[in-house]
Image (spheres, rainbow, N blue to C red):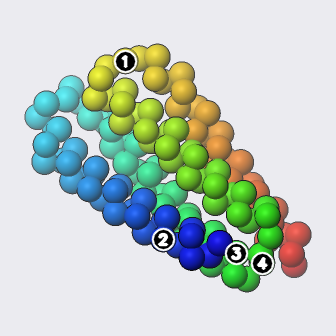
Amino acid sequence: MDRIFFITGAVSAFFAVVLGAFAAHGLKSRLTPEMFAIFEVGVRYHLYHALALFAVAWASTRWPGTTISAAGWLFVAGTVIFSGSLYLLSLTGLRWLGAITPIGGAFFLLGWLLLAWGVWRSV
C-alpha cells in the first residue's frame, strides 16, 4: 500500500499544481473574485492532502494496518469530493455543489483521525 499511496500522492500533487497554475494564468480574469477564491481553496486543500498521502505511505511502512490505509483512501475521497466540488462550483456557478463540499471535508477530518488512531494503536 505504501507505493500506491506514494504514487497517488505524487499524481495528486501534480494535478494540484497544474490546476493552481491554470487558475492563476487562465481563470483569474474569467472568474469573479469570489469564484476564484473558491477555486483556490480547492487547490489548497488538494495539495495539502496530496502531501498527506506521502505521510500515509510512510506510516503504512512503519505501522501497517487497515486503519492507516483507510485514512489514505479517505484523503483520496475527500480530495475528489471537497476539491472537486469547489472546482465545479467555481467553474459552473452551480451553488448546489456547495452542499456536497462538507462531505469531502468530513472525509478529510476522519482521515486525520484514523491516521492518528492507526499510529496510536501500533505504539
Position of 64 with respect to 6 (left or right) is right
- The x, y position of residue 100, in whole percent, is 54, 27
- Of label 1 and label 2, which has the lower sequence position? 2
Residue 61 seen in the figure: yes
> In 3D space, how far apart are the residues under numbered discs 3 and 1 (Cα atoms)?
38 Å
Rendered residue at 26%/35% (across/down): 36
User: Which quadrant holds residue 102?
Assistant: top right
Please name the residue that numbered disc 4 is placed on.
63
Identity of the amino acid at label 4?
Trp
Please name the residue that numbered disc 1 is placed on.
94
- Of label 2 and label 4, which has the lower sequence position? 2
- Of label 4 and label 1, which has the lower sequence position? 4
C-beta proximity under 8 Å, tags 1 and 2: no
Position of 62 with respect to 3 (left or right) is right
User: What is the secondary structure assignment of the residue under circle 4?
Assistant: loop
Please name the residue that numbered disc 3 is placed on.
60
Rendered residue at 50%/39% (across/down): 82
- The x, y position of residue 86, in whole percent, is 41, 34
> In 3D space, how far apart are the residues under numbered discs 4 and 1 (Cα atoms)?
42 Å
C-beta proximity under 8 Å, tags 4 and 3: yes
Rendered residue at 64%/60% (across/down): 72
- The x, y position of residue 40, in whole percent, is 33, 43
Please name the residue that numbered disc 2 is placed on.
7
Quadrant that contains the N terminus: bottom right
User: What is the secondary structure assignment of the residue under circle 1?
Assistant: loop
> In 3D space, how far apart are the residues under numbered discs 4 and 3 (Cα atoms)?
5 Å
Identity of the amino acid at label 1?
Leu
Q: Is label 1 or label 2 in front? A: 2
